[in-house]
Every structure is written in structure tokens, then in C-alpha cells.
Image (cartoon, coloured by chain):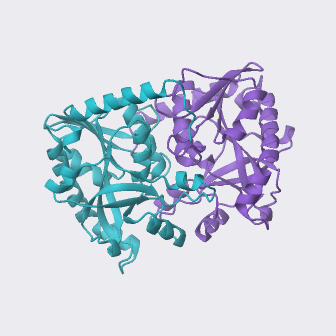
Chain colours: A purple, B cyan
Amino acid sequence: MAPQHEGTEVVAEEAEAEAADADKKLISNIVIVIAMQTEALPLVQRFQLMEDPDTVFPKGVPWVRYHGIYKDLRINLIWPGKDPIWGVDSVGTITASLVTFASIQELKPDLIINAGTSRGFQAKGACIGDVFLASDVAFHERRLPIPVFDEYGIGARRTFSTPNILRELNMKTGKLSTGDSLDMSPQDEALIIANDATVKDMEGAAVAYAADLFSVPAIFVKAVTDLVDGDKPTAEEFLQNMVAVTATLDQAVTNIVDFISGKCLSEL
Amino acid sequence: MAPQHEGTEVVAEEAEAEAADADKKLISNIVIVIAMQTEALPLVQRFQLMEDPDTVFPKGVPWVRYHGIYKDLRINLIWPGKDPIWGVDSVGTITASLVTFASIQELKPDLIINAGTSRGFQAKGACIGDVFLASDVAFHERRLPIPVFDEYGIGARRTFSTPNILRELNMKTGKLSTGDSLDMSPQDEALIIANDATVKDMEGAAVAYAADLFSVPAIFVKAVTDLVDGDKPTAEEFLQNMVAVTATLDQAVTNIVDFISGKCLSEL
């Protein structure tokens, strides 16, 4: 474990008091992290957000910030942009953790929403078009077979608890497992099963890691584009379902944001 | 590819001119990124660096900065620290990209050195205790079987070219492949072979990605603790060789820093 410093208890008490205050404060500032442009743009329109010409992020990064006020909420939607070399959406854990880190530093959000499409497991009750609010996140591609390092690699953690959103919006919940590959190797599969995952994505656990460093609450809204244990080939199924499922995802995010408006963290 | 904006050519010319100036300026400010404490501490002693009590990094991160002046070079050695939950070294691509990103923002280095232990491939000429200066880096755990996304996932890129270091210090060179697992699945192996890698680590390509966003030159010094295609079990071999190989790594980094002192980038 990390070394204990003098005054740790005082700091812990202060942090608890701060957290309790934050729980009772109206949520005013949300960061939404979305990896793909096709997932992001309908929400930009829905919330009538504007692209920031003078980005708050350092010169050099392709990250795009859309922002605006929607139902008294300051919304920052961050899309990691197109890769400077290959020109495709900058998907995956590295960019997800970087934009989350930088967004927390620059925008001080009350809450982070990571939204995106994902792959689901039929055997765990997922259907194409379902939208899950993840109860837990973990990694399935960080295999470190040394005691304690193995747990660090998996990095399992609970997400911010939102029982009222789940109940009021009648959403499904399940565990989310994250890795940088679209396909699934037998080693990935073994860890995904060990992680008890219902959905699999490429960003969630990385967003959670960066948010947890600063104790910023984060929730994970994942819509199922294809089934890992279904009978269609992955890439084809993924592309076919992408447009329709994105619309469902965007509706779910809008419902969540509508629900959040005028509430404090403890009411979620 | 990324959209072309008006004035792109002017910006490109200015960037080229700036790069040419930087190539001729004496190197004065180095960031060394090292993932493991046992690899970092001997170099902290060697360069007589001090731990920064008021870290330049945001409150909440476990990252540790050691700094000092050594042979007219301002050296910042960044170790990502112990994980706040599990207490082990924060190894892997996410923390490596985060500390590289934040170090570039806060410390504006002329050059980044990512140093660490690695696994080598006997079939490609690696022996235990060898220290490689990587010619190229790539990922082997980011499988995205969609055109162009596949290349983005692999993220192959050349490192900053240092022909004089290679020749004067008589160092080996080879390609480096990066992933978040210590072991190697058949899928990893196929991509490592496709990447033509001689050494395999858990940070290099992530450091390169973050450095490339800001066109900061980066070099990769990787010492071989165990052979992937050798006959000993991984974890045992890794732990046995760790101490001796770390001493070799630290000597190689010292030799490189000694060589850099009083030179500009174009002389490396």
C-alpha cells in the first residue's frame, strides 16, 4: 500500500467533508467524454453546443471541446478528435485517460459521463440496442502475473452509484470491461469472464482511472452495437448497427442529462 | 486524414524553422520517464536529484518528480509512483502517456528519455543484460480489424534518430513493441512479429505517442531482463535478473546523459 504520511487522518476528514458538501451542491458542470465523432455530433446538435475555437487544451492535441448551457447545466462534450497521423477517431484507453485528465484540470467538472457504443454478451442478458449504465469497470488486456500487480492490471472499481437514474429511467446495469482491441482473444475472454462483464468497450476503465485520481464521480453509458457471443462477424455487425444504436445512445444520454438538471450528486 | 485548414503551409514552415532552431540549440532540459522505483532510484542517486516536495503535477496524482542539475543539464526524472489503491508501481501505457503529457506541459523538455527494463527476443539477437536504443516503437495489443484503424492501433513510429549515440556508445538498436501485459498471448506474438520487434516493454509506444503530439524528441533505452523465447519461466526470470540488469540500464542512461551534455539535438 501507499506510504502513510503524517496528517493523513486530518486530510481524509477534510476530503470527506468536501465530498459531503459536493453531494449536496446542485450539479452545474458536466464533462461528457465520447470517443467517436459519429457518437458525439448528434449530442452536440441536441444540446446546441458550440465548438471551442480557442481550445482550453494545449496546442498540438487533436481533442475537440464542444460546450454550452443546456437546462442550467454547463456541458462540455470532449471528443479526442482525429489522430494526427492516421486521421481516424482517436479511440482507446490512452486518449481516453489523457482527455479525462486534461478535462478535469481545465474544466473542473462535478460529474463525468463517458458515453459510447460497446459490444455486449448475450449470455449475460445484453441485446443489440440495449443501453447499460455500468456498475463496475475493469481492464481485460493488462495481464501482470505477479501478486498485487495482477489486481492493479485488472483495475476493477465501482462506478459512481446512481440508483435513482437506474430506477427512474428504467435502465439496465451490468459490469463493463475495457480493452484496446475490437476483437477478443481467448486471454481477453478469460479475463472478461473473470470480470463478470456484460459489456465491453475501449475507454471506460481508462476514464474511470483518471477520474478516480481526483475523486471526480464518473458514470458510464454504453449502448450495445453487436454481440460478442452472437452469430454475425464483428466488423460487419458493428458497422451495420452503428447508426441506429448511436441514436439510442444519444437519447439515453439526453434522458440522463435531463434527469441530472436541477439535482445534486446524492440525488442521482 | 485530418482536415487541412487555411494557413497550414505557413504553420508548417514556422514549425520547421522552429525545429531547425531547436536542433542547433544546446540541450538544457531533459525529462527521464521511468516506470519502476527500483529502476529510478539508482539514477536519482547517480545524478544527485532531489524529490520535489511541492510537485508541479496536480494534487491527487502519485507521480514523483526528482530534479537537479547534472553536467549543466536540468534533469527531471519522473516516476509515476505507487498506485493509490494497490500500492504497486504504476506501470503501463496509461500512466506512461499521462506523465509524459503532463511533464511536457509543466517542464517543457528539449528531449525525453524513456528508460526501463524489457523482455527480449533471442531470435532477433537480444541477450539478457543487453541495452537497446529503440529505432521504432509500436503497440501489439491494440487490434482494430477495420481499415486504417488497424494502423492507428499499431501506431508504429520512428523514434528520434541518434546515430552518434549509437556509434560512440556502441549500443545495440532494434524495434520496440509495447503492451500492457507481462506475458504474451498468441495474438500479441503475431503482432510483435509483424512489428519486427527485438524488445517488448509496457510503456515505450505510449510515451512516444504523447511526445509526438507536441513534437518533442524522445528516445527509448531498454535493458533486457529476460528472453521471451528463452527457456525459463517469465516471472521467476524477471525477478532474478531485475537487480543486475537495472544496474546495467542505469549505467547506459548515465553514459547517454554524459554524451548529451554540451550537445545540441542534431549532434545526437
User: Where is residue A226 drawn, in percent x and y?
Assistant: 76, 57
The answer to whether residue A2 is seen in the rendering is no
The answer to whether residue B3 is seen in the rendering is yes
Position of residue B95 in the picture relative to residue B124 (left or right): right
Position of residue A108 in the picture relative to residue A226 (left or right): left
Along the viewing direction, whichever of B186 and B25 lies nearer the viewer: B25
Quarter where residue A113 is shown: top right
Image point 56% across, 34% down: which residue?
A63
User: Where is residue B220 drawn, in percent x and y?
Assistant: 31, 52
* Residue A76 vertical placement versus B36 (above, below): above
* Residue A23 vertical placement versus B160 (above, below): above
Image point 76% across, 34% down: which residue?
A42
Position of residue B40 in the picture relative to residue A202 (left or right): left
User: Where is residue A45 drawn, in percent x and y?
Assistant: 76, 28
Q: Residue furthest bottom?
A: B231
All told, the count of numbered labels is: 0
Image point 74% across, 53% down: which residue?
A239
Which quarter of the figure is the C terminus of chain A placed in?
top right
User: Where is residue A26 drawn, in percent x and y?
Assistant: 71, 22
Quarter where residue B99 is shown: top left
* Residue B169 vertical placement versus B99 (above, below): below
Position of residue A93 in the picture relative to residue A231 (left or right): left
